[in-house]
Amino acid sequence: MVIVMKTTAKREDMDNIERLLERLDLGAHISEGSERTIIGVIGDKRLLDGVPLELMAGVDKIVHIVEPYKLASRAFDPNPSTIKIGDETIGADKLTLIAGPCAVEDRDQILEVAEYLKNCGVGFIRGGAYKPRTSPYSFQGLEEEGFKLLAEARERTGLLVVSEVISTEFLDEAARYVDIIQIGARNMQNFQLLREVGRVKKPVILKRGLSSTVEEWLNAAEYIINEGNYDVILCERGIRTFETYTRNTLDLSAVPLVKEISHLPIIVDPSHGTGKANLVTSMSRAAIAAGADGLMVEVHPNPKAALSDGPQSLDFPKFSSLLDEVKKIAKVLDRSI
Amino acid sequence: MVIVMKTTAKREDMDNIERLLERLDLGAHISEGSERTIIGVIGDKRLLDGVPLELMAGVDKIVHIVEPYKLASRAFDPNPSTIKIGDETIGADKLTLIAGPCAVEDRDQILEVAEYLKNCGVGFIRGGAYKPRTSPYSFQGLEEEGFKLLAEARERTGLLVVSEVISTEFLDEAARYVDIIQIGARNMQNFQLLREVGRVKKPVILKRGLSSTVEEWLNAAEYIINEGNYDVILCERGIRTFETYTRNTLDLSAVPLVKEISHLPIIVDPSHGTGKANLVTSMSRAAIAAGADGLMVEVHPNPKAALSDGPQSLDFPKFSSLLDEVKKIAKVLDRSI
Amino acid sequence: MVIVMKTTAKREDMDNIERLLERLDLGAHISEGSERTIIGVIGDKRLLDGVPLELMAGVDKIVHIVEPYKLASRAFDPNPSTIKIGDETIGADKLTLIAGPCAVEDRDQILEVAEYLKNCGVGFIRGGAYKPRTSPYSFQGLEEEGFKLLAEARERTGLLVVSEVISTEFLDEAARYVDIIQIGARNMQNFQLLREVGRVKKPVILKRGLSSTVEEWLNAAEYIINEGNYDVILCERGIRTFETYTRNTLDLSAVPLVKEISHLPIIVDPSHGTGKANLVTSMSRAAIAAGADGLMVEVHPNPKAALSDGPQSLDFPKFSSLLDEVKKIAKVLDRSI
Amino acid sequence: MVIVMKTTAKREDMDNIERLLERLDLGAHISEGSERTIIGVIGDKRLLDGVPLELMAGVDKIVHIVEPYKLASRAFDPNPSTIKIGDETIGADKLTLIAGPCAVEDRDQILEVAEYLKNCGVGFIRGGAYKPRTSPYSFQGLEEEGFKLLAEARERTGLLVVSEVISTEFLDEAARYVDIIQIGARNMQNFQLLREVGRVKKPVILKRGLSSTVEEWLNAAEYIINEGNYDVILCERGIRTFETYTRNTLDLSAVPLVKEISHLPIIVDPSHGTGKANLVTSMSRAAIAAGADGLMVEVHPNPKAALSDGPQSLDFPKFSSLLDEVKKIAKVLDRSI
């Protein structure tokens, strides 16, 4: 942390800050520039948490040098993490494919999708039991019944199950039925939910918030890891920008960026990321080419009849074709599916 | 709702849509333009919820004509709502002032602020008991003890208490201690929390999400009202943009806009909206001039020692001066404090 | 400027940087923290322009401490600038009102507006002769004829004339007819135009770019001042965000912020800032309350017949009422119109 | 175009609009819904340009159905355009590679890069002669001398030359020396420059503006095509968002989107798009996988000594490795380099 002094700062202002830092067992390194004096703070910056240095006389601004997250950083673990669930591994050379409908709608639908995905060689099925919807008048999900149908699909096919938890009160229920708990974009900064999912012994997919910086996203992962759950998978799903032709702007540069500053695996959701079925295959290819560890794609036996997110869901033939294209890209990058 | 057909759409595509609408008891009004054919849908659009018309052959896009929220709209109630709590009224000619520290830190702090605000003629004290913090290593609040100290402050001064609830499990607890429940920006689309706060018999301050459009904000209010709680107060607190000199971009045009399309009262939080104490007074004046029904301002007896948000908190002399300036503006707009 | 080293940086990396800085006659102040070493650079940072320190071995990132603009900064001139044109003063206690149609359409229109504004006590008339339009199929302005009509309006009424220049080739022409040259939002980073307008002896209104930070805006002003023209007036006109109910998001916090970090006067354009006539009066009040030095408002004798920007233009009765309201706010802030 | 009436609109309001449309030789198709009446406008909408229908009594809003651009749309030309320059073809199965330094710095630098690129099999060299720089104190380019050096590089190597024109006064000069004229992001809405470049007989690379929607970008292309120059190549180079870890957010979904709605070729600039050399290779792979027709990449013999954009430039070994990776992706997509 660097404290930048105003051009009008006085000797005693520097002295006051030095004394304050000393009292907190922190060192001060004063550097007088041609225009400004800056003070480097030496020691554990957490001792300064909640100390509004900005308000001390003579201080212009505080510049943070070191990222606030620790456990999620590459410095903490220089090797990429891998996560093992049953026979599946997430991270490393493996590409993880997660597919399924936006919402679990009924038994026939979810079993039909599961059989299809099994035959495709996909390892994970996704489906929403509790749906966060912008309008209270939209379909809100089958709730616990949805989890049960997903568990039945697993029994029949061996596919592992991914489903979202939208509130702490449904966490125990979810932990009984699903293999990976998903935290949705709108809950990325629901810190209470992050803390509690950190105490559960299940891997977590943490979607990026609509307006979250990569730093805030890694801070959210830090909440989960800090409670003891290291099995966090990041999922880029588009951010909010001024562009309106797409539902969100899929930020694929977050993929190589996260790989550089964090050891966590990162997958991409091109369905929410674009909101348009006809862009999903192109962006799936691009995500894998950018270095993503996997994809989460919305697939529906009959998108025209889907109760939610139909316009961004692929039908079976389109998903099969997506798989073919993604495999070609994966091959030249030496990644297996 | 208007269905816009592709230039390549065929007669039978139009016929298929017409038949689908008929089956759903909806009318279709076909209008052939020089470049495109459009189909106006007549009837209750909720019957189409989850029907992905975008996927039908020949359809280019769907254009929504009517806002998705009903109960929060001005059409539902053409008169501005007022909310009564004890002797205080929110809305109409009255300006509501809510002030206090970001976080309740200890008994002395909160009682000192309460006494001061009482003497200023402010009606509401705010203070966080549960703090949503970006980093898990920051101060997280006193939790229930914080609510108790706020309640004690009310007993001593008669001030009404505003405090945030960050998760459904703390809602009962909050309802016992506070007079207005605040839903924070990061929880604006925590739909489970919205539903449950809609069942509580306490007024709710609903902060705008960092990246929420005004339409999504009113949809969030709709979730609360739809459960039976009509006492919703909107609070503009800045949105996320590319500008970095301020913490957020305070969107004051949302104030007259909301007044036009909704009957709900709207207040402004210039402390979070700017993140800088020295901008708070100017933006408080501007908020009132824009037509806001009140302000929520962070005040701390000693911002330099604040455990959170010190840089955006006002000390007592600065808040007193803010009050003087705001009163002058209020007077010429015929609003009383 | 502070150079932040990687955790893996070696002694020789620091030595290399020190040697490079020495060669450039710059000092290095090395400060070893608990996690990172940082190097403060001492001396004129312009010597480092174009030296990509980020690429040197061991360097993590470069943090800029001092703003890149000098002549536009408050440090350069601690007193707010005022600009004199004829009998008018811009800045200080005076509020500047600039009004008129988006585009000069014909002689009758512009003379009618000028007479009306004269009677209102407004000092400046605006009107576009060259119009930057998103689509090539929209009305593009009367060009030089527009400037001439504005000059005729000045002769008849004594109003001073403000008009936009969209390209360097029209600058001489504009300088012959107008009193203040306007640089539009889309040209805020047309650096060639900025340089050339810096050589003209006329005050310049510099509108903020749609996606420009305040720092980039002051850098653009710096281009003009650096050529010798100190008479720059900043104009906040809304930035681009994800919100779609308004045309832009008017960033009023830029007003007190600019007043703090720059000596230049700043006015507000609530017409483009909101894009909706019915929000203009509220936001005009708010702009003045925030501390703006003036307003630029679109007024048209018959907005329904306007060739451009009709939806955000006020008719005469609405503008007269705006003036009344703004005067009330101005009075309590001790500013005269 | 659809006119949406207010719930309070009266019969006579509809009649007035119908009469106005009739006078303009446009048809009106009135459709009474359960909540609102809408009026479909039939005929050439350009007749309505500048008619602010929003202001007519009873009108709530105007919804545009058809895109404002024509010549740039896929409807105008259902086949993807290809552009021929010398022996090179841009578009179709060919991937176009454009590489070179941000700025032409001196003869040795540009000739060294040209020889290197020639040996790599790259067809186009880029280099800035006139540099648009945020600060007036940064290196502004060699100006005409830069164009001459690029032309010399072409003579020696046969590479075709791409360089930016920042103002209309340099257009003739540029046309003498370069093969493709580049319009930079900051000039994407410099409409005068667009019009004039539309009259030049050289292909144009049109970079997307920092805060431009895809619709505005295609409108900018329309300005050029409308003057007779059909050889427009779009270049996605990142948009401005709230994320600060990258310089811009590269919007790769614009690639398949543009391919769907326009016939123009589209290339990607991952150097400006990310601002970080270590993200460029990943994002180049991703761009090609998304379907881009080519890449524009910053390459410098010694990025550490570059006068501008060093941090995002690749040195020769890194660029050679990028080429290898891109070729592998191109191969599986059946595209040749």
Image: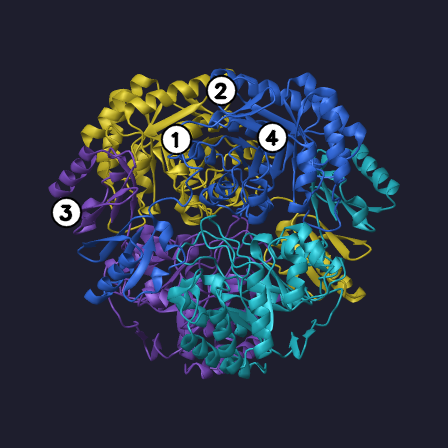
Chain colours: A cyan, B blue, C yellow, D purple
Regarding residue B319, the answer to whether it shows in the image is: yes
Coordinates of residue C135 in the picture (x, y in percent): 29, 51
Residue beneath disc 2: B93
Residue under circle 4?
B296
Type of amino acid under label 3: Leu
Q: Which residue is drawn at 24% across and 49% down?
A: D1
Counting other residues with Cα less than 10 Å from the Cα at mark 4, is it few (<14), some (14-19), or many (20 or more)? Answer: many
Q: In the structure shown, which secondary structural element does the residue marked by tag 2 occupy?
A: loop
Could you give the CA–CA distance between mark 4 and mark 2, rounded to whole angstroms?
Answer: 17 Å
| Towards the viewer: C53 or A226 | A226
The residue to which callout 3 is attached is: D26
Q: Residues within 10 Å of mark 1 (few under 14, many from 20)?
A: many
Query: Crowdedness of circle 3 by 10 Å Cα count: few (<14), some, many (20+)?
Result: some
Q: In this view, does B246 lie above or below B120?
A: below
Q: Where is residue C283 in the image (x, y as percent from the top left)?
A: 44, 30
Q: In this view, does C250 lie above or below D185?
A: above
Between label 1 and label 4, give the one nearer the viewer: 4
Report the Cα–Cα distance between label 1 and label 4: 24 Å
- Front of the two marks 4 and 2: 2
Let me know if residue D118 appears in the view: no
- In this view of the protein, which residue sits in the foreground, B260 or B44? B44
Q: In which quarter of the image is the C terminus of chain C?
A: top left
Position of C174 compared to A269: left or right? left
Provide the chain ID for the residue under circle 4: B
Front position among marks 1 and 3:
3
Same-chain status of marks 4 and 2: yes
Secondary element under disc 3, as helix, strand or loop, is: loop
Chain of the residue under the numbered disc 3 shown in the image: D
Chain letter of the residue beneath label 2 in the structure image: B
